[in-house]
């Protein structure tokens, strides 16, 4: 047991975040039940596989929770490097689907390394700031942020070239949240605001500004994007355009969500779902299925469950015994929040379609296992908050 760096006693079990574990399990079970309707016959009954992923995820959570925190700190860089190597290997032996080289195909099983890269990035950033005694001095300046930014930019770049813009954005937002939690100088905050203004200006110039057909204006970024990526941004800014093409996904999703009303049409009775008008209804647009069949009230209930889960994550951060645990908890909370925000936002048309799964709800073994592993880290931190 000592070789495996495992340590669990009665005091640790008493300190386990049981509410976090319970809420996680409740959301996952609701997700499996919803998936059974989303993938009804003659479609493949993927809910059975999802139920197996949940069970595997629970065992993975328990395994991670039982490891010594010092062992996790030592593992941070090896886990990060292993994920980087996996992303590089995709360029040579990766399986291409939907235009992206994002998976390893192991027989019938597909593994998406980018999902686990999120955990590797959170671990290495948590270790970096845990070991940085200069956090006590004041806000992080640009020089002091070079190393954590390098840790972040490498996987972001590797995910972008797959290309997987959605996951790359999730890595960006998760890393930025952790960096802001570390405390940044006013100069950095000003730079972030300037950067936001620049991005807004580029979007306006490239996608919103009108110009005569015979005199098109110069674009700054749009001509570098793939055609479907540019079309998604244009469709987001003009949701009523190209309803049979670029905006088909969002239009059908909004119809499903709106038709659910207050109480929904009932499990298995969703017309958009049953007639397969919803694209990717078991993965990216799984929230549309829930909203159509269960309605607005049930949708709010599930969102409240997610809010409770995030509060539990932040509670672990607040009570962590060291900076490593606090940064881990904040990173995991950020990972879940930004995925939830993007997925629900794109489903109702507020954000561009980026192909982001809904944590614990969308079908996918890599997504489910990565979330359970991440939450297992928080269980580990909570169990050891009074152990020295």
Image: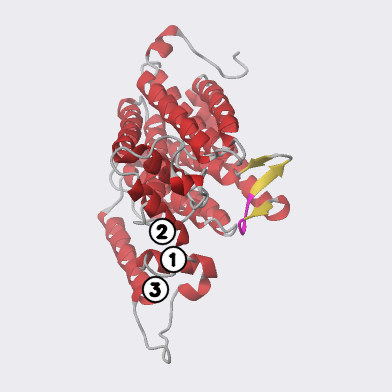
Of 319 and 162, which appears nearest the observer? 162
Prevailing SS of the magenta stretch: strand
Considering only vertical position in the picture, is 270 above or below 47? below
| Rendered residue at 69%/51% (across/down) | 94
Residue beneath label 2, please? Answer: 251
- What residue is shown at x 42% (from left), y 86% (from top)? 216
Graded by Cα atoms within 10 Å as few (under 14), some (14 to 19) or many (20 or more), the crowding at tag 3 reads many
10 Å crowding of disc 1: few (<14), some (14-19), many (20+):
some
Query: Do labels 3 and 2 touch, CB within 8 Å?
Result: no
Q: Are marks 2 and 1 in contact (CB under 8 Å)?
A: yes
Quadrant in which the N terminus appears: top right
Where is residue 51? Give x, y as percent: 55, 28
Indicate yes or no whether the magenta region holds residue 100.
yes
- Measured from the top left, where is residue 289 in percent x and y? 43, 43
Q: Quadrant of residue 358?
A: top left
**Distance of mark 3 from mark 2, alpha carbons?**
20 Å
> Between disc 3 and disc 2, whose residue precedes?
3
In the image, which residues are magenta?
Answer: 98-102
Q: Which residue is mark 1?
A: 243
Is residue 181 among the parts visible in the rendering?
yes
Vertical arrangement, residue 268 with respect to residue 174, above or below: above
Q: Is residue 183 left or right of residue 218?
A: left
Total label count? Answer: 3
- Kindly identify the residue that appears in the image at 43 percent across and 55 percent down: 252
Q: Is residue 384 visible?
A: no
Q: Is tag 1's residue or tag 3's residue first in the polypeptide sequence? A: 3
Q: Earlier in the sequence, mark 2 or mark 1?
A: 1
User: 212 or 334: nearer the eye?
Assistant: 212
Q: Which residue is mark 3?
A: 207
Which quadrant does the C terminus fall into?
Answer: top left
């Amino acid at each position: 047991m000592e070789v495996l760096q495992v340590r669990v006693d009665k005091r640790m079990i008493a300190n386990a975040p049981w509410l976090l574990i319970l809420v996680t399990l409740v959301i996952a079970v609701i997700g499996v039940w919803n998936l059974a309707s989303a993938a009804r016959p003659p479609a493949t009954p993927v809910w059975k596989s999802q139920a197996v992923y949940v069970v595997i995820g629970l065992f993975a959570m328990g395994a991670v929770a039982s490891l010594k925190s010092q062992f996790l700190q030592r593992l941070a860089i090896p886990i990060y490097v292993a994920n980087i190597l996996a992303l590089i290997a995709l360029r040579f032996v990766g399986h291409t689907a939907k235009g992206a080289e994002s998976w390893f195909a192991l027989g019938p099983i597909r593994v998406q390394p980018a999902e686990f890269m999120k955990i590797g990035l959170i671990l290495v950033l948590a270790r970096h700031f845990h070991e940085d005694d200069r956090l006590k001095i004041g806000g992080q300046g640009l020089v002091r942020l070079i190393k954590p930014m390098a840790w972040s930019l490498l996987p972001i770049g590797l995910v972008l070239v797959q290309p997987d813009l959605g996951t790359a954005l999730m890595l960006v937002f998760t890393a930025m949240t952790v960096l802001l939690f570390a405390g940044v100088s006013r100069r950095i905050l000003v730079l972030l605001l300037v950067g936001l203004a620049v991005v807004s200006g580029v979007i306006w110039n490239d996608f919103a500004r009108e110009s005569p057909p015979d005199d098109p204006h110069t674009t700054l970024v749009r001509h570098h994007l793939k055609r479907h990526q540019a079309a998604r941004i244009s469709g987001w800014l003009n949701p009523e355009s190209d309803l049979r093409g670029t905006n088909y996904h969002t239009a059908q999703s909004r119809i499903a969500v709106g038709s659910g009303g207050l109480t929904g049409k009932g499990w298995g009775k969703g017309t958009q779902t049953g007639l397969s008008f919803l694209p990717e209804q078991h993965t990216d647009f799984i929230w549309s299925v829930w909203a159509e069949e269960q309605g607005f009230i049930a949708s709010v209930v599930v969102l409240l469950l997610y809010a409770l889960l995030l509060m539990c994550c932040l509670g672990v951060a607040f009570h962590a015994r060291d900076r490593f645990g606090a940064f881990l908890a904040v990173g995991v909370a950020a990972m879940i929040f930004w995925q939830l925000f993007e997925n629900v936002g794109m489903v109702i048309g507020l954000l561009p379609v980026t192909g982001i799964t809904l944590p614990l709800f969308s079908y996918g073994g890599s997504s489910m296992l990565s979330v359970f592993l991440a939450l297992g880290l928080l269980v580990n931190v909570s169990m050891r908050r009074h152990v020295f």
